[in-house]
Image (spheres, grey):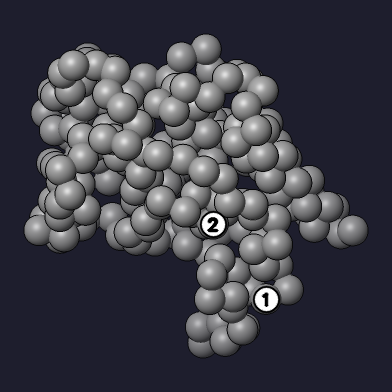
Amino acid sequence: MSTQPSTRPRCPQCLRALRSCICALAKAVEHQAQLLILMHPQEVHEAKGTGHLLHLCLPHSQVLIGEAFDAVTLQQALHGDGRHSLLLYPETIEQDAALGLAAAAPLPAPWPCAPSALRLVVIDGTWRKSRKMLYLNPALQALPRLALQDVPPSQYAIRKAHLPGQLSTFEASVQALAQLEGWAEHASERQSLEQTFAAFVQRQMQRQSGF
């Protein structure tokens, strides 16, 4: 069996093999809050991953790939422009203490802030990997955390959730942006992102079934 790395041509935007490029699915939407996607290396070429698609849809987004980030680089990404960074991650005080995580900072005052003053930080990886990334990066532990409200059922049919209420990176980020930006349920931005996600899931299901 060959151990040589794959040399398949890849799209420079979504980093997928050209035959499975997802760029055509992405439709850019307007948003004011910035988004920082911290992508685990194993998600970079993961066919079921949604981080790249999210990045393509959000003009004011940035992707950093890694697990334990350089402290200076991460601090610059989190605080370099004066915005308030919020971590999209559930705050479970007892579990955090058991894992040796520092207590999260309070939300910036006054709250809520204008979306243009905020940066949403999203960890893109499985729940196990995201917990490890949080543990390895103290700067993330120190961020205020944003809790999702009225979480809808996940439509991420191509990847199994371990617990009820768990969403894909794409779904959770859309839900969080809707809260920060004040998007109503039927706002055009929200509908556009949800339609893009539905098209992505449908396409992946078709590929898995051989169609």
How far apart marks 2 and 1 lie (CA) works out to 16 Å
What residue type is disc 1 on? Leu
Q: Quadrant of the N terminus?
A: bottom right
- Closer to the camera in the image, 182 or 89: 182
Q: Residue at x 40, y 26 (%)?
A: 180
Judge the density around disc 1: few (<14), some (14-19), many (≥20) Cα neighbours within 10 Å: some
Q: Closer to the camera: disc 2 or disc 1? A: 2
> Would you identify the image quadrant in which residue 8 lies?
bottom right
Which element carries disc 1, helix, strand or loop? helix
Q: Tell me where residue 50 appears, x and y as whole percent.
A: 56, 49
- Closer to the camera in the image, 18 or 193: 193
In the figure, is residue 119 to the left or right of 76? right
Pointer 2 or 1: first along the chain: 1
Please tell me whether residue 127 is drawn above or below residue 74 in the rendered image.
above
> Would you identify the image quadrant in which residue 118 lies?
top left
Which element carries disc 2, helix, strand or loop? helix
Residue at which label 2 appears: 56
Asked if one can make out residue 59 in the rendered structure from this viewpoint, the answer is yes
> Would you identify the image quadrant in which residue 97 lies?
top left
What residue type is disc 2 on? Leu
In the figure, is residue 86 to the left or right of 97? right
Q: Residue at x 9, y 58 (%)?
A: 72
Q: Quadrant of the C terminus?
A: bottom right
Q: Tell me where residue 181 appears, x and y as whole percent.
A: 44, 28
Residue at which label 1 appears: 18
- Closer to the camera in the image, 41 or 78: 78
Q: Tell me where residue 62 appears, x and y as whole percent.
A: 37, 56
Please tell me whether residue 98 is drawn above or below residue 16 in the rendered image.
above
